[in-house]
Image (cartoon, rainbow, N blue to C red):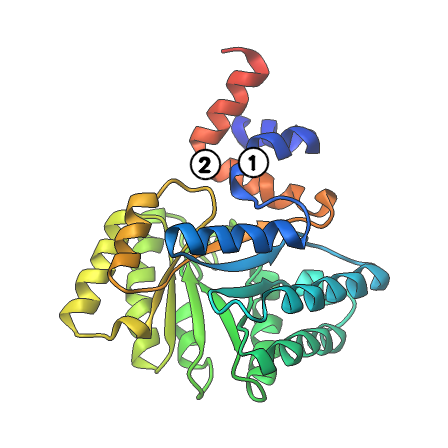
Amino acid sequence: MDLKNAIIDLMPGRLVRIFASPYTAGKGISSGVGKAGELHTQLGLSSTLDLLGEEVFLREDVEATVQVYFRMIEAVKDRPYASISLKPTQLGINESEAYCQDNLRRIVAAAAPHGLHITLDMEDRHFTDVTLRMFKAIRDEFDNFGIVLQSRLFRTAEDIKALHTKPCKVRICIGIYKEPVEVALQDKADMKAKLFDYVQLLLDHGHYPEIATHDEPLIRRCIEHLDKHAVPKDAYEFQMLLGVPRTDLQQEIVKRGQIMRLYLPFAEDWKYAVHYLKRRLAANPAMVGMVLKNLFGS
């Protein structure tokens, strides 16, 4: 672990909240829904609401999390600019695949009558197979269910080809989890090049790519390629994280008549949010510099 990551890892949760606050909508469903409405009204942006929290182990905590998702569905069911993302480690995968799949199905089923889209996030490589199995089983039954794939993993091309015979919304991103050289690319430029390739591969297999990147040259390369091949603007979208300064580019995409969606995290309990916020700090050198300056006065 380098010095930057070591310092961030030792930061108390309260300090993490202060310096990572641009990346979150705040605490509680109302904060997330309110921010989503503000982004849509003021900037024409769509959102996917993300309840922060990973590695939930106790069944009572898992069930409490399921109930939060039910309340989220009620809060956004009439907001077509909003969707919801969720994670297997929030919803019982640490107990069993069957238990987690049942919880996922309950949430997707509750959202389906409202046409509300649910995205199943992809966590680290240890969960890739089980996440895809659960996704495919539930996708057989419901159309409002999408998945995330990571361009850094060597396996992703085959995962796309085997994804599902029904068209799916697929968030394609480089992924935030550091993976070993045996299973994943290590160079960001290679990951971005693969992301570009996978956008077309997803289209070739009938899927709807959700192109999740902040890299402007990569976005412009995708736009040029998709326009050149006359891919309809409603056949894909772009996604970014809340708090990353790309307002001009986001507005350019909106003015093209396309969906520009922000990943919009909020917390019900801050203890579950700290890991996500620390990763956001570690991934953003500018934020880390601000933290160090405020910590050490340098």
Instruction: Count the marks.
Output: 2
Dot 1: element: helix
| Residue depicted at 21% across the width and 68% down the height | 226
**Residue 251 placement (x, y as % from top left):** 30, 51
| Mark 2 neighbour class, 10 Å CA radius: few under 14, some 14 to 19, many 20 or more | few
| Mark 1 neighbour class, 10 Å CA radius: few under 14, some 14 to 19, many 20 or more | many
Q: Which mark is residue 284?
A: 2
Q: Amino acid under label 2?
A: Asn
| Residue depicted at 62% across the width and 72% down the height | 130
**Residue 16 placement (x, y as % from top left):** 62, 33
Dot 2: element: loop
Closer to the camera in the image, 152 or 248: 248
Q: Is residue 6 above or below residue 76?
A: above
Pointer 1 residue: 20
**Residue 26 placement (x, y as % from top left):** 62, 44
User: Of all residues shown, which one is farthest toward the front?
Assistant: 41
Splitting the image into 4 quarters, where does residue 62 fall? bottom right
Q: Is residue 110 above or below residue 290?
A: below
Is the N terminus in the top left, top right, bottom left or bottom right quadrant? top right
Closer to the camera in the image, 205 or 82: 82
